Image (cartoon, rainbow, N blue to C red):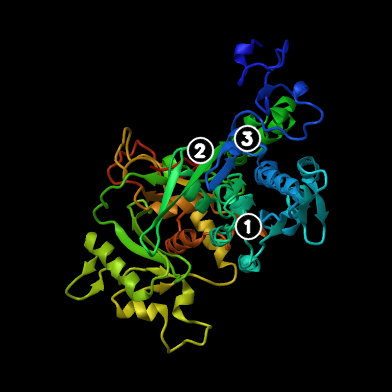
């Protein structure tokens, strides 16, 4: 290979023509010239960029194997370097110095952070040969740096965040951020603080993750989508006294190709290439719009399941379905059923923290837009339809029979519902109906059909304006203990809404023959099943 083909050019040591892959001080060097005494040197490219960033919030995310986890604890060495210099100066002046630098590294569960605790020893002893581990508290203390501390910790449960209420951290690291809830991340970010002016410029919350896990959506929305990669996003906060405080965040993408050691071996790349398409796309290419282990990962196809907004066909049957929540999200979808029995969600409402009366106001606005609200009668024109609502809203089995229920509150505000189908095994059966609809195709009405209601389409699809279901359904994880169910600890509200709709309109085996078709044009007695997979892509 010619040196001009090297990604970062040749090694800068005299006479060496090998490709440079590391940064050692100011030099770009190859593997052989890294130096036996150098325990850690960043890879040129994305890992080096991560270490160069000084923004208050840095997210290093993408494909597996990009050397992200190790980067998180080694980055604390930047604060240790500051404290080492201060400790040396204090020693010269004959005064005591106690560092206030405190780093904390989080994994969701104990086994994972214990593994990290053991892996970091070589790096920490290189930073400070006198570094002392405490396996009871899972901390490292750095005597040469004024006894600065780095702690390994976990937050398995959301409420575990309160264990760190009194922490004053100068560096916070989240490894596999998509395993965490956003509330955990936000709470710990409030613990990033110091009264030491020397450390103030170095305060950072850094995190890393692959595109999988129950938190994929909030991580994607917070770090991946707002601005292009490696573009600084400035966040302004107006204080009570009128002052404006700014802080910056940046996303550094990572791919397996950023780790030349793993790429040279080829073994890890080969293992990823042999995985299922959705696993390969997420973990090898760092695709944030498909999730390995997603329940619908091998089913969802944006080109089929998402359609341009269009007019509701004449004589289509219209109904709505809903999964209710107050502090958890409510998901309400409006569907039309076409002549072939296909369902299209044409409107959607997602709310959090709203009571029935406030949700009803938003529903009235939506139904008025489509002529579905009777202003004179102050009620929905869909009240005679079969509109399934989470059965728990009807009070059965909760000692509420005869009292107030969510369903009765809606009824009094002009919206009638029926209980969703629930019973032993109903969840799996209802999900099966949803899967069946998503994998069953209605053929083109005629050759060359282009209209959304005439061209080939799945039996369940979503107009582009239904943003939330398009966002959440493709990435909802499979339940750990049941491959036929979704992870109910994840964001399953839009799935439940659609599941109730599909269960209420169960799919027949055959397709209705169109009246305008010639007898010679045979329509299949069974709808065609999707037998391929197109990876999910963002809908803009």
At horizontal 67% and vertical 21% (from top left) the residue drawn is: 20
Q: Quadrant of residue 388?
A: bottom left
Check disc 3: other Cα within 10 Å, few if <14, some if 14-19, many if 20+.
many
At horizontal 39% and vertical 41% (from top left) the residue drawn is: 443
Q: Where the C terminus falls, by quadrant? A: top left
Residue 46, position as x, y percentages in the image: 59, 33
Residue that badge 2 annotates: 534
Q: Where the N terminus falls, by quadrant? A: top right
Q: CA distance from mark 2 to mark 3?
A: 31 Å
262 lies left or right of 250: right
Residue 395 seen in the figure: yes
First in residue order: circle 1 vs circle 2 = 1
At horizontal 58% and vertical 61% (from top left) the residue drawn is: 191
Residue 375, position as x, y percentages in the image: 19, 71
Vertical comparison of 496 with 22: above or below: below
Q: Quadrant of residue 99?
A: bottom right
In terms of secondary structure, where does tag 2 sit?
loop
Instruction: Work out which residue is located at the far bottom of the displayed protein and give it.
Output: 402
Residue 469, position as x, y percentages in the image: 43, 54
Q: Is label 1 or label 2 in front?
A: 1
Residue that badge 1 annotates: 169
Q: CA distance from mark 1 to mark 2?
A: 44 Å
In terms of secondary structure, where does tag 1 sit?
loop
Q: CA distance from mark 3 to mark 1?
A: 23 Å
């Amino acid at each position: 290979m010619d040196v001009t083909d090297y990604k970062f050019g040749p090694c800068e040591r005299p006479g060496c023509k090998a490709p440079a892959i590391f940064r050692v001080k100011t030099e770009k060097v190859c593997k052989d010239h890294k130096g036996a005494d150098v325990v850690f040197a960043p890879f040129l490219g994305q890992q080096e960029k991560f270490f160069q960033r000084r923004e208050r919030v840095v997210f290093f995310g993408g494909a597996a194997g990009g050397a992200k986890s190790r980067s998180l604890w080694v980055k604390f060495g930047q604060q240790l370097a500051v404290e080492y210099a201060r400790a040396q100066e204090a020693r010269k002046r004959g005064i005591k110095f106690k560092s206030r630098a405190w780093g904390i590294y989080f994994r969701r569960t104990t086994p994972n952070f214990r593994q990290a605790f053991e892996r970091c020893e070589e790096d920490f002893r290189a930073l400070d040969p006198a570094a002392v581990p405490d396996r009871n508290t899972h901390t490292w203390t750095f005597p040469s740096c004024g006894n600065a501390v780095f702690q390994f910790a976990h937050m398995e449960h959301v409420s575990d965040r309160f264990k760190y209420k009194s922490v004053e951290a100068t560096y916070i690291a989240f490894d596999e951020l998509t395993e965490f809830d956003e509330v955990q991340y936000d709470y710990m970010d409030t613990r990033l603080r110091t009264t030491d002016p020397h450390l103030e410029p170095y305060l950072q919350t850094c995190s890393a993750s692959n595109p999988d896990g129950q938190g994929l959506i909030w991580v994607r929305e917070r770090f991946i989508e707002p601005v292009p990669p490696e573009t600084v996003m400035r966040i302004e906060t107006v204080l009570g006294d009128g002052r404006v405080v700014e802080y910056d965040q940046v996303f550094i993408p990572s791919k397996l190709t950023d780790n030349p050691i793993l790429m040279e071996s080829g073994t890890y790349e080969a293992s990823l290439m042999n995985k299922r398409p959705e696993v390969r796309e997420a973990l090898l290419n760092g695709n944030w719009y498909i999730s390995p282990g997603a329940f619908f990962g091998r089913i969802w196809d944006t080109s089929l399941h998402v359609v341009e907004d269009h007019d509701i066909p004449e004589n289509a049957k219209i109904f709505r379905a809903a999964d209710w929540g107050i502090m958890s999200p409510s998901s309400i979808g409006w569907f039309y059923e076409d002549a072939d029995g296909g369902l299209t969600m044409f409107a959607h409402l997602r709310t959090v923290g709203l009571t029935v009366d406030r949700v009803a106001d938003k529903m009235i606005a939506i139904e008025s837009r489509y002529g579905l609200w009777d202003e004179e009668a102050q009620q929905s024109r869909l009240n005679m339809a079969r509109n399934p609502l989470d059965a728990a809203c009807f009070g059965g089995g909760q000692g509420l029979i005869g009292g107030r229920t969510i369903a009765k509150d809606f009824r009094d505000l002009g919206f009638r519902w029926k209980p969703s189908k629930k019973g032993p095994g109903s969840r799996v059966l209802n999900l099966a109906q949803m899967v069946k609809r998503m994998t069953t195709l209605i053929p083109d009405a005629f050759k060359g059909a282009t209209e959304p209601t005439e061209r080939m389409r799945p039996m369940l699809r979503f107009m582009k304006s239904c943003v939330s279901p398009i966002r959440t359904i493709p990435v909802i994880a499979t339940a750990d203990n049941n491959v036929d169910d979704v992870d109910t600890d994840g964001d399953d509200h839009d799935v439940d809404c659609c599941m109730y709709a599909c269960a209420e309109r169960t799919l027949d085996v055959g397709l209705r023959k169109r009246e305008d078709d010639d007898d010679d044009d045979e329509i299949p007695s069974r709808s065609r099943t999707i037998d391929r997979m197109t990876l999910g892509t963002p809908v803009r």
